[in-house]
Image: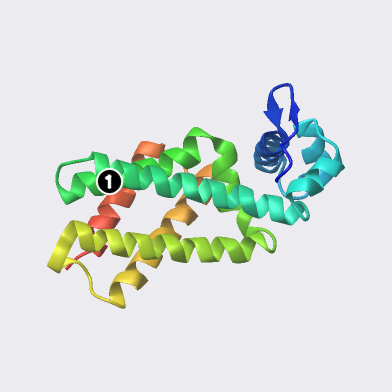
Amino acid sequence: MSRPTRQYRGRSAEERAADRRERLLEAGLTVFGGEGDTKATMTAICQEAGLTERYFYESFAGRDELLVCVVERIAGDIRDRALAALAETEHSPEERARAAIAAFVAVLTDDPRKGRIAVVESAATEPLRTRRRALLRQFAHLVAQESRELWGESALQPPHDEVSALLFVGGLAEVMTAWLRGEVDVTPEQIVDAATRHYLVTAHR
């Protein structure tokens, strides 16, 4: 017979461990997104989470693993919100594309921590840089796939669709980097307008 799970204040050990992991991830988002890579030490993250290093190692092998998880969670948020916007918009391909792009931009601008991590800090050091490149390719593949759904036979065909999508995703990431660094004087809405116009020209024949 399996041993019963011990409860503490009505919560199992597994639930408490999951809560500690969430606190560490949120702390990583706050410290990494606010202070940058050099200040996002394991000690700083543990202090922000209110946990000891013992609990850090309960969930993560090291600082880099946590930071990669933070980046991947932001990417998952972008993907989910963009796909939801596509699904919820029942109009023309142009309007659906704009909704998805607006969702992408909103994730990175509504919470500056996420924007800085996703497109600025993730490009600064390894292993984040390698993971960032892989995520950009994944997003490009998703854009090419959704373009076929939006445009049907008029969509670009392989390999041109993947190349065009990577140019689009990479270019948008660079624009967001410039915006987050204060290098371009535009609003998020203007970024969405420009990105939508670019996509509509390049995603289909």
Which residue occupies the foreground of this view, 97 or 58? 58
With 4 as the anchor, is 201 left or right in this view? left
Quarter of image, res 201 = bottom left
Given the current orientation, which residue lies at the most extreme bottom position? 159
With 195 as the anchor, is 36 left or right in this view? right
With 142 as the anchor, is 43 left or right in this view? right
- In this view, 65 is above or below 45: below
Disc 1 marks a residue whose amino acid type is Leu
Residue at x 30% of width, y 63% of height: 145
Residue 160: image x %, image y %? 29, 75
Residue at x 72% of width, y 38% of height: 17
Q: How many marks?
A: 1
Residue 81: image x %, image y %? 39, 42
* Secondary element at image label 1: helix
Residue 171: image x %, image y %? 42, 59
Answer whether residue 2 is visible to the viewer in this image.
yes
Which residue occupies the foreground of this view, 150 or 98? 150
Answer whether residue 41 is visible to the viewer in this image.
no
Q: Badge 1: how crowded within 10 Å, few (<14), some, or many (20+)? A: many
Q: Quadrant of the C terminus?
A: bottom left
Residue 12: image x %, image y %? 70, 32
Which residue occupies the foreground of this view, 11 or 160? 11
Q: Which residue is mark 1?
A: 86
- In this view, 64 is above or below 106: below
The colouring scheme, among rainbow, by chain, secondary structure or one colour, is rainbow
Residue at x 80% of width, y 49% of height: 57
Given the current orientation, which residue lies at the most extreme top position? 9
Quarter of image, res 146 = bottom left
